[in-house]
């Protein structure tokens, strides 16, 4: 009802500005009275950029229209758009675009006309805290302060996003009310994946027992692999034997089944229903966090209690793959599933099922009989370690979740009453950070002087080594030049995994002060100890990282400078060689030796001071690009500023950035938790896809693109971006489990579906990694499926329209190369919707 009321009046949609009613507005004369109180330089900047208020698209009859409705004394409004939709060219070259008149009018009206006592921004995240200006300690000329002024400001924010929450604190005086992540669950298999899994089990049962059935099933599986296009998703060579294909298929299906996905959305102040809550508790208990049973992973405790061994060693359930299971098969695990038990992955699945069943019964308190199941559990006395963890789950963890639901709303009420909001840590709970619970607190982040932390350094070394090994195995050589995107949010959440990985690749070790654990220096690891060439790593940092971690950028720049002077035997110091070669070119172009050496060593790039973003979102959203070179130009313009140098910060260095991009062989993006994925956010395609596309534009070749999974710090996994896209599409986007969960959230659930399609398209626009059959399957699951289409029509027809338009755009741009009948179906759908809209007027 609320969203219907909001959409029934003026919004940010330019197509309906003059056809819908407006329930509040601000007279231009009154607006100008407040506008003229701004610093002269700010007035001139806005007037020069946007002209007079009468030129604003939200100007009507001498007034500036404001989006929202009044509910008693409460105003519920839609935050104005930043302005990039009003000047499409600004998406290419204007990262510090000032907000338009109607943006200021919105906040002036709230402050001076409606005279609100406080503002609550709902939804991660808005655009106020990302307006141009200083990174902290804002002045009267900084646009967040100009708009908001000295206003009490509350901001519900997900607990796993300390960086963007800290941005709202630093630049918009926000008091954070943190909240839980969405419910989590295993993806499991479905549809054609479940059918293939069943065929594979049948095949292995027949193996060596019935030769004719074995041949029949193998051929049936291989045929199904081609029909479902799963064959293209397997990590195999063209020369792979049928047996190798089947082994890889087995491993891939296991990976999809065990992938952690969101099982709906979090509702502020509520816990999910019991079954989703039970799955979420298992997800929170899955990773080991320390010593003792309550801090071990719940699967590890079950392994210890059931005395499961593989190859003479205790079985590691989080490392189990498609290898044959040769350990014991306890009756309790056999009773949980009638499926064939033959691999380590099958053992893990049974442990997952047992863990979920035990949590249901002994923590959440769901009666197994009510679920139509029998528990069949051994007495907890026979599972002593697991029993201790279940006690912790029931008495501590579950209690913290219930307190979270209670505090998320009560804390907001306390804040509005002018009372203190308790502080608390931030991080990803499913990555072992259970200290972030309960939520409903004003979260804090990290000491930037401790980056990277010793724990992050350990992970960084493991991840760097895994990346090098994979590249060496598949490309036949060591990686020499890598581009890495580094975000402030992930750095705060992990203690600096990304920077630690970059240091490890370069052969740099941080030095920490005893006691404080603050990073005070670094040391160069000799090439003899590295056992490989150094890797030259160029960083593209986010705007928030630039603001929050200037000390880390300086440390990184100092490390590059030191390596430029450091001699390794046998040409192992590739960084020194690259800097020397580039400096020679720059000297030949007229620079002094000192200038050339300094510029050749630039390795940290980011947005213009006071600006944020990577520059692609506006182009994609507004469809105002023609070729991939347009996207590369925007990426270069927005990120071409050098940091971490010894003679200034944030100066324009587009030529240097373009040169560095043109030299990169590998593009890397790390992801530190599975509470979201790469099709949940525009940042991934902007930074990872944007860098990959720019490398292609400026080098003429496609880089190798890796996506590192750091969700389990003990076992980082290096996948190609294509593998990660395949995995996310199969495990979440096409998964009925996720789709049905989103349907439970109405308008917002439909929005999430449309957002995933947008981000999928954008990744293809920047990397050309989405296959035709994937567009086809997404169309079938989200747009053309009659049940989901009806849900969308009833709850958010705009989301349905946007998905159809985006998929059609993919055909028009040649991304979806052979759409066959799907283009016609999508066009027919849009025509039908247009006709229905006309009839409804």
Image (spheres, rainbow, N blue to C red):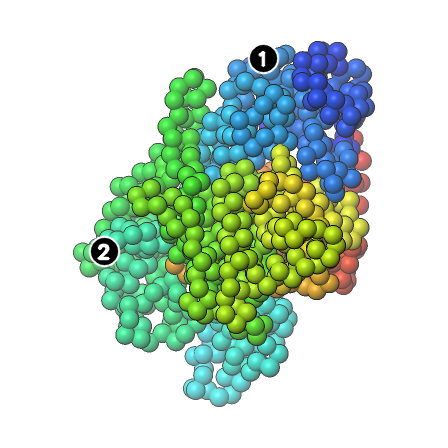
What's the distance in space between the residues labelled 2 and 1, CA to CA? 58 Å
Element under disc 1: loop
Expressed as whole percent of the image width and height from the top left, the position of residue 139 reads: 58, 23
Q: Residue at x 56, y 44 (%)?
A: 646
| One can see residue 443 in this view | yes
Disc 2 residue crowd, few under 14, some 14–19, many 20+, Cα 10 Å: many
Q: Give the number of the mark in front: 2 or 1.
A: 1
Task: Reply above or below: 698 against 33.
Answer: below
Expressed as whole percent of the image width and height from the top left, the position of residue 714 reads: 39, 59
| One can see residue 254 in this view | no
Q: What label sits on residue 385 in the rendered view?
A: 2
Q: Is residue 292 left or right of residue 468?
A: left
Expressed as whole percent of the image width and height from the top left, the position of residue 67 reads: 67, 24
Out of 217 and 306, give the one closest to the viewer. Answer: 306
Task: Reply above or below: 683 against 776.
Answer: above
* Marks 2 and 1, the one that precedes in the sequence: 1
Q: Residue at x 28, y 71 (%)?
A: 313
Q: Is residue 74 left or right of residue 303?
A: right
Q: Residue at x 67, y 28 (%)?
A: 80
Disc 1 residue crowd, few under 14, some 14–19, many 20+, Cα 10 Å: few
Out of 735 and 567, give the one closest to the viewer. Answer: 567
Which corner quadrant holds the N terminus? top right
- Find residue 538 and report its image quarter: bottom right
User: Where does label 1 land, which residue?
Assistant: 115
The outermost residue toward the left is 381
Out of 201 and 531, give the one closest to the viewer. Answer: 531
Q: Is residue 624 left or right of residue 666?
A: right
Q: Residue at x 77, y 20 (%)?
A: 53
């Amino acid at each position: 009802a609320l969203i219907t009321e909001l959409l029934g009046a003026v919004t940010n949609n330019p197509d309906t500005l003059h056809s819908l009613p407006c329930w509040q507005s601000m007279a231009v004369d009154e607006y100008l009275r407040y506008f003229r109180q701004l610093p002269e330089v700010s007035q001139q900047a806005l007037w020069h950029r946007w002209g007079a208020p009468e030129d604003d698209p939200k100007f009507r009859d001498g007034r500036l229209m404001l989006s929202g409705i009044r509910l008693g004394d409460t105003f519920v409004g839609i935050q104005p758009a930043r302005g990039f939709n009003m000047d499409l060219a600004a998406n290419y070259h204007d990262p510090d675009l000032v907000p338009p008149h109607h943006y200021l009018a919105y906040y002036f009206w709230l402050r001076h006309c409606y005279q609100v006592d406080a503002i609550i921004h709902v939804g991660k995240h808005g655009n106020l805290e990302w307006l141009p200006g200083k990174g902290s300690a804002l002045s009267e000329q900084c646009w967040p302060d100009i708009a908001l002024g000295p206003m009490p400001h509350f901001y519900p924010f997900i607990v796993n996003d300390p960086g963007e929450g800290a941005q709202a604190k630093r630049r918009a005086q926000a008091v954070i009310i943190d909240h839980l992540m969405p419910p989590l669950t295993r993806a499991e298999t479905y549809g054609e994946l479940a059918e293939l899994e069943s065929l594979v089990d049948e095949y292995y049962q027949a193996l060596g027992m019935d030769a004719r059935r074995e041949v029949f099933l193998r051929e049936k599986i291989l045929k199904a692999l081609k029909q479902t296009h799963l064959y293209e998703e397997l990590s195999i060579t063209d020369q792979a034997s049928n047996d190798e294909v089947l082994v890889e298929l087995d491993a891939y299906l296991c990976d999809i089944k065990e992938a952690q996905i969101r099982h709906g959305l979090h509702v502020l102040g509520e816990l999910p229903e019991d079954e989703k809550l039970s799955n979420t508790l298992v997800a929170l208990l899955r990773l080991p966090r320390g010593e003792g049973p309550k801090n071990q992973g719940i699967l590890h405790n079950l392994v210890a209690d059931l005395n499961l061994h593989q190859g003479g060693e205790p079985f590691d359930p989080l490392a189990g793959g498609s290898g044959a299971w040769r350990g014991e098969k306890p009756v309790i695990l056999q009773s949980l599933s009638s499926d064939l038990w033959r691999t380590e992955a099958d053992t893990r699945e049974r442990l997952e099922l047992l863990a979920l069943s035990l949590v249901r019964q002994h923590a959440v308190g769901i009666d197994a009989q009510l679920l139509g199941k029998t528990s069949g559990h051994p007495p907890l006395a026979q599972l002593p370690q697991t029993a201790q963890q279940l006690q912790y789950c029931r008495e501590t963890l579950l209690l913290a979740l219930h307190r979270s639901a209670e505090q998320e709303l009560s804390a907001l009420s306390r804040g509005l009453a002018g009372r203190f909001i308790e502080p608390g840590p931030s991080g990803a709970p499913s990555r072992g950070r259970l200290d972030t619970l309960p939520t409903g607190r004003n979260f804090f982040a990290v000491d930037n002087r401790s980056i990277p932390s010793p724990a992050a350094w350990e992970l960084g070394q493991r991840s760097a080594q895994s990346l090098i090994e994979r590249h060496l195995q598949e490309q036949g050589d060591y990686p020499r030049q890598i581009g890495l995107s580094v975000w402030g949010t992930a750095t705060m959440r992990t203690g600096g995994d990304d920077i630690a990985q970059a240091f490890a690749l370069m052969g740099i070790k941080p030095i920490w002060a005893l006691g404080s654990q603050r990073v005070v220096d670094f040391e160069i690891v000799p090439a003899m100890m590295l056992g490989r060439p150094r890797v030259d790593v160029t960083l593209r940092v986010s705007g928030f990282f630039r603001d929050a971690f200037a000390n880390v950028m300086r440390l990184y720049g100092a490390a590059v400078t030191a390596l430029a002077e450091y001699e390794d035997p046998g040409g192992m110091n590739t960084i020194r060689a690259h800097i020397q070669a580039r400096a020679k070119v720059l000297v030949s172009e007229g620079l002094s030796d000192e200038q050339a050496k300094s510029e050749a060593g630039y390795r940290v790039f980011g947005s213009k001071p006071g600006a944020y973003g990577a520059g692609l979102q506006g182009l994609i959203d507004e469809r105002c690009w023609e070729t991939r070179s347009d996207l590369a130009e925007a990426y270069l313009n927005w990120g071409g500023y050098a940091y971490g140098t010894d003679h200034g910060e944030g100066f324009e260095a587009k030529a240097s950035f373009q040169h560095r991009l043109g030299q990169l062989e590998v593009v890397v993006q790390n992801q530190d938790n599975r509470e979201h994925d790469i099709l949940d956010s525009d940042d991934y395609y902007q930074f990872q896809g944007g860098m990959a596309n720019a490398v292609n534009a400026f080098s003429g070749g496609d880089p190798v693109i890796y996506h590192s999974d750091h969700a389990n710090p003990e076992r980082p996994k290096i996948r190609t971006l294509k593998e990660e896209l395949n995995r996310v599409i199969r495990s979440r986007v096409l998964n009925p489990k996720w789709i049905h969960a989103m349907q439970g959230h109405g308008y917002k659930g439909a929005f999430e579906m449309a957002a995933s399609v947008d981000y999928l398209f954008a990744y293809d626009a920047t990397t050309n990694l989405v296959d035709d059959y994937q567009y086809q399957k997404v169309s079938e699951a989200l747009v053309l499926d009659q049940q989901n289409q009806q849900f969308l029509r009833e709850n958010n027809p705009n989301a349905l329209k946007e998905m159809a338009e985006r998929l059609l755009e993919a055909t028009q741009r040649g991304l979806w190369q052979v759409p066959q009948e799907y283009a016609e179906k999508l066009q027919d759908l849009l025509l039908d919707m247009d006709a229905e809209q006309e009839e409804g007027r």
